[in-house]
Amino acid sequence: KRIERKVSKMKNHIIVVGVGNIGTHVVNQLLRYDEKVVAIDKAVNENAFFERIHGNKEKLILINGDATNEETLLKAGIREARALITTLPDDSLNVFVALTAKNLNNKIYIVSNINNLANLTKFIYAGVDYPIATAEIASIRIVETVIGNKPKENVIDILNIKDKTFRVEIVDVENTKLSGGKIEDLKLKEKYNIFIVGVINNEKFLMGPSKDYIINPKDKIIVFGESSGLENFRKDFLQ
């Protein structure tokens, strides 16, 4: 009853389902931004969980329960929540949580960890607004750091649409063939179907640089495009 009274006073909070390794990191990051969080997990030890929390614990409520159960989500204030993040290790459970949540609050924004990209369409049909393949992103980062000795590349996001994979990457310009080139002359769209969407220079960020922008050796450029195009771009400019 005490938990229900505390939750009843919350509005626009964020529900996190599953507080294993990923879920606990998510909770800590949300608390850094001073968000109100209701965490749900049916197996977690409460004392052990709160020992791993570094933010303001006054803004965090833990509910021991099954998030695929409507009663548990209602207890977590699903109708007043603005977002739900589900990080369970089983895709079918994440999909079921999303379906149940959308049924109770069709306006809620849902982010979900996806373990198998073959299940992507299921997440979309379930109403997940932003599926994130955390394991795939991590594996790509790890392998590309080692194979081919590619320290200049930093994959910051991966987006899968149907059978195509798109990436956002940060590229360190220094000692590459990009240095001193004008964006228009590189013909990145024509040759690789990729785009420079931003430039970082001396901690300053320029979004959408013009075609006349000349790339500085100290720049870090943010590029977006299909994986195959980015691979060819790397071969031509970064190796």
Image: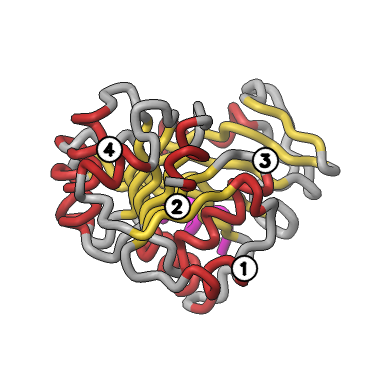
Mark 1 or 2: in front is 2
Q: How many marks?
A: 4
Residue plotted at (24% across, 31% down): 102
Residue 66 visible, this orientation: yes
Q: Provide the residue span drawn in magenta.
A: 228-239
Amino acid under disc 4? Val
Amino acid under disc 2? Ala
Q: CA distance from mark 1 to mark 4?
A: 33 Å
**Which numbered marker is on residue 101?**
none
Are the residues at dot 4 and dot 3 in contact (C-beta closer than 8 Å)? no
* Crowd around label 4: few <14 · some 14–19 · many ≥20 (10 Å): many
Residue 159 rendering spot, x and y as whole percentages: 36, 44
Residue plotted at (18% across, 38% down): 99
Work out which quarter of the rendered image holds the C terminus and state it.
bottom right
Q: CA distance from mark 1 to mark 2?
A: 37 Å
**Against 35, is 210 above or below?**
above
Residue 227 visible, this orientation: no
Residue designated by label 2 = 39
Amino acid under disc 1? Pro
Residue 32 rendering spot, x and y as whole percentages: 68, 48
Are the residues at dot 4 and dot 2 in contact (C-beta closer than 8 Å)? no
Choose the circle earlier in sequence order: 1 or 2. 2
Mark 4 or 2: in front is 2
Choose the circle earlier in sequence order: 3 or 2. 3
**Which numbered marker is on residue 34?**
3
Residue designated by label 4 = 128
Q: Nearer the viewer, residue 185 or 167?
A: 167
Mark 4 or 3: in front is 3
